Amino acid sequence: MKREDITGLIVYLIIFAVVIIFGVTVISTHYGDSLMNQGIYILYVIGAILVGIVFNAILYELGHVLGGLAGGYNIVSVNILGFNLYKDGDKVKFRFHGFDGFTGETTIVPRENAKKEPRPALYLFMGTILYAIELVLVIVFFSIYNSQGPLEGQYYPVASNTVYFLLIVAVIGGIIVFYNILPFHLDSMTDGYKLTMTTNKANAQAYNALLKSEYDIAQGKENIEIPTFENITNFTADLNLNKVYVLLDNKQFEEAETLLDLIIANKEKISAKTYLRTYAQKIYINIAYKGKDEAKEYYDNEVPLDLRREISQDNAMPSIRAYVLMAGVLDRSRSEVLLTIEKSKKAYKRTPEGRKHTEFVLFNEALLMVDALHPDWDLKHHLLQESISKK
């Protein structure tokens, strides 16, 4: 199990424990004072949880928007629980879209011709500040309620149920903030992790360059100048991988492999997932664009069994297309190829917009290569379709 998987498991166990403890202590105590029957009270709690998720997801992304604007960025899109508002030219449009985050994602780009380097700290921390204000207000309401002593008559259950409803909403918000503010790389790069990384000025500049290059690629701009970095961190590695996609698009495989080698050589400085997918890119180049004997020698000597297994289990396009070649060209396993193909369409939809075109081309090239070796496997109808590649 990878380090970030263990960390993520611990985080989810902590969240689960908090929910259980809160339910057993606070919620169960309030149930007796609520004057509701069991069925209605369950609906009451579920309603408070749903309101808490939606309200705090909106509040947190509002923090990203305000912090981004204050920090010197333009807002590209705001995604709350899959409801995505995004800019298309001068227009704001809506779509349902996936997101990289716990409850949402706000994407930003540095303002052009800004007098000062944009500051990611405000963007990353403002959601927590807004939640702190929410928490203070709930504590004030709860304190006022408790200081009044027992309320008599019909207003007591109304006051009690209102205050505890707000308390549940605040606890849900606390869970969202707890996940996002942790300085670890979990299922996604948390705000806390990015905040820790971007306190370094060089990393902050790399982060802004990463945002700019990803935006330009997503907009379909050509001849994009993407800087590369010798000092490898997760941010600079991801920025270098953007450059790798451009090089692969232009069939500049030697230059791409040089950048991949730089990232791989700094394994201890990057996350396990970044390392795995970088290695998958290198494997893809070696199998797809080098001679069969050279590819076989590289695969046998440089790709250990545990790495092959991890690539086969990964659900990102770089690993999927690499494993199609590993299974189809070198291992000659039709069943493994078909199992990997099954993951491709869902993985492709999750691919960042700026990388979709290249992944579309590279995956289909890999599949056609396997099909040419094994025409009886009937793989051509599994090719990604042009309609899927459109935004």
Image (tube, helix red, strand yellow):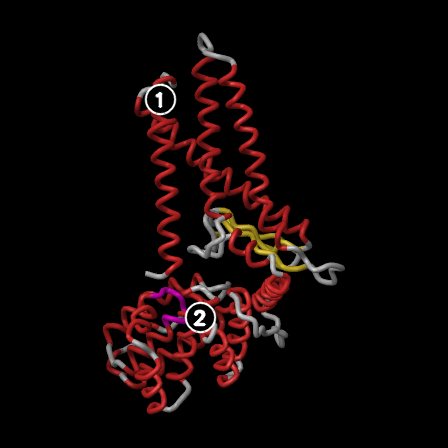
Q: How many marks?
A: 2
Q: Quadrant of residue 13?
A: top left
Residue 78, above or below 258:
above
Q: Secondary structure at mark 1?
A: helix
Q: Position of residue 42 (x, y in %)?
A: 34, 28
Mark in the foreground, 1 or 2? 2
Picture coordinates of residue 134, whole percent (x, y): 55, 34
Q: Nearer the viewer, residue 40 or 6?
A: 6
User: Which residues are drawn in magenta?
Assistant: 314-320
Q: Is residue 324 magenta?
A: no
For residue 97, say whether it is visible: no
> Can you see residue 47?
yes
- Work out whether 382 lies above or below 36: below
**Residue 151, percent across and down?**
47, 11
Query: What residue is rendered at 63% in x and 48% in y?
Result: 67
Q: Nearer the viewer, residue 348 or 241?
A: 241
Residue 71 in the image: x percent, y percent? 67, 52
Residue beneath disc 2: 267
Q: Residue at x 43, y 55 (%)?
A: 186
- The residue to which callout 1 is attached is 31
Mark 1 residue type = Tyr
Q: Is residue 197 above or below residue 20?
A: below
Query: Is the residue marked by circle 2 packed among few (<14), some (14-19), or many (20+) residues within 10 Å?
Result: some
Element marked by disc 2 = helix
Q: Residues within 10 Å of mark 1 (few under 14, many from 20)?
A: some
- For this orientation, the residue located farthest to the front is 268
Residue 369 occupies which quadrant of the picture?
bottom left
Q: In the displayed structure, does residue 369 sit left or right of residue 67?
A: left
Q: Nearer the viewer, residue 331 or 239?
A: 239
- Measure the alpha-carbon separation of dots 1 and 2: 52 Å
Label 1 vs 2, first from the N-terminus: 1
Amino acid at circle 2: Lys
